[in-house]
Image (tube, grey):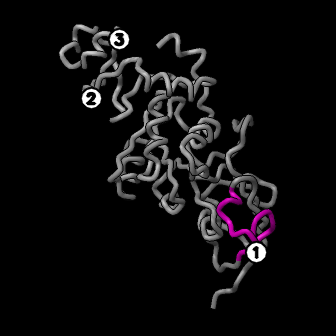
């Protein structure tokens, strides 16, 4: 019979969102035998690995390949804001300066907002979990989900459980979590299919316009994928108002 060991774990910051209320903000005892990889007990205790940014064991930084030892004291941290990680142990490759996303079936409205702000955001309301995982892995996309179980799949490298329920709050949450404020490029992606928008002359699309659109609007763009046409109508004005604080410096240029 293998000897049983114990180790102490403490989760910090928003990683406590994944723990039962009675276990949050306190030291947890983990019982084990052998020397399991540290990622396993972290997930057994509740925190999915894509949400973990730093692991400290007995005061030393370690990676996911660390094997747990008897009486280890483990501190597990989420992503930090405004901190230099250059000297820290990397748990995964850094996120690209131009991150690409895939959203699960619960985040359709958020996907629309992400595309409005110019972020490459795949979404379909018939995606299955395995579809999301395969696309995320093959295209190196960040998984955004409201289903925390999705983040426990071992193949997912970058992912985030969206805490907010309302899309209007979710977009603010994502912009802050991934520090995307400086990467906003509004009205450059199709809200329907995520394709790139290109400017077109009114004459090119005139035959597809409704009479009032022909009369009142002069500036148009078209999705290179689905050919959907966009213009600065009331729907765009409403969106401009919603994101006025983000788009003010850039709206005049689009």
Of 80 and 54, which appears nearest the observer? 80
Q: Earlier in the sequence, mark 3 or mark 2?
A: 3
Q: Secondary structure at mark 1?
A: strand
Residue 37 lies left or right of residue 253; in this view the side is right
Nearer the observer: mark 1 or 2; the answer is: 2
Q: Are marks 1 and 2 in contact (CB under 8 Å)?
A: no
Q: Earlier in the sequence, mark 1 or mark 2?
A: 1
Outermost residue toward the front in this view:
212
Height in image: 250 above or below 137? Answer: above
- Which of the 4 image quadrants contains residue 215? top left
Q: Residue at x 66, y 49 (%)?
A: 53
Queried whether the magenta region covers residue 96, the answer comes back as: no
Of 54 and 202, which appears nearest the observer? 202
Q: Which residue is mark 1?
A: 29
Query: Is residue 94 in view?
Result: no
Task: Residue 148 in the image: state x and y as whole percent.
Answer: 54, 60
Q: Residue at x 60, y 35 (%)?
A: 175
Q: Are marks 3 and 2 in contact (CB under 8 Å)?
A: no
Q: How far is disc 1 from disc 3 in space, using C-alphas?
A: 65 Å
| Mark 1 burial class by Cα count in 10 Å: few <14, some 14-19, many 20+ | some
Q: Which residue is mark 2?
A: 225
Q: Which residue is mark 3?
A: 217
Q: Which residues are magenta?
A: 15-30
Q: Earlier in the sequence, mark 1 or mark 3?
A: 1
């Amino acid at each position: 019979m293998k000897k049983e060991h114990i180790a102490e774990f403490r989760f910090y910051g928003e990683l406590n969102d994944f723990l039962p209320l009675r276990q949050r903000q306190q030291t947890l005892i983990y019982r084990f035998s052998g020397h399991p990889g540290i990622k396993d007990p972290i997930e057994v205790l509740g925190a999915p690995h894509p949400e973990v940014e730093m692991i400290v064991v007995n005061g030393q930084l370690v990676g996911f390949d660390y094997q747990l030892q008897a009486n280890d004291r483990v501190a597990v941290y989420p992503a930090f804001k405004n901190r230099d990680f250059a000297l820290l142990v990397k748990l995964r490759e850094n996120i690209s300066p131009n991150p690409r996303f895939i959203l699960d079936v619960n985040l359709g409205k958020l996907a629309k907002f992400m595309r409005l702000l110019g972020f490459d955001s795949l979404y379909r309301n018939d995606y299955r979990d395995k579809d999301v995982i395969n696309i995320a892995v093959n295209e190196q996309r960040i998984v955004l989900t409201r289903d925390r179980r999705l983040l426990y799949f071992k193949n997912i490298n970058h992912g985030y459980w969206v805490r907010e329920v309302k899309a209007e709050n979710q977009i603010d949450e994502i912009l802050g979590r991934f520090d995307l404020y400086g990467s906003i490029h509004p009205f450059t992606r199709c809200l329907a299919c995520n394709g790139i928008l290109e400017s077109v002359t009114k004459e090119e699309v005139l035959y597809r316009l409704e009479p009032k659109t022909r009369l009142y609007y002069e500036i148009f763009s078209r999705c290179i994928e689905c050919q959907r046409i966009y213009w600065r109508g009331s729907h765009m004005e409403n969106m401009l108002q919603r994101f006025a604080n983000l788009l003010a410096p850039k709206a005049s240029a689009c």
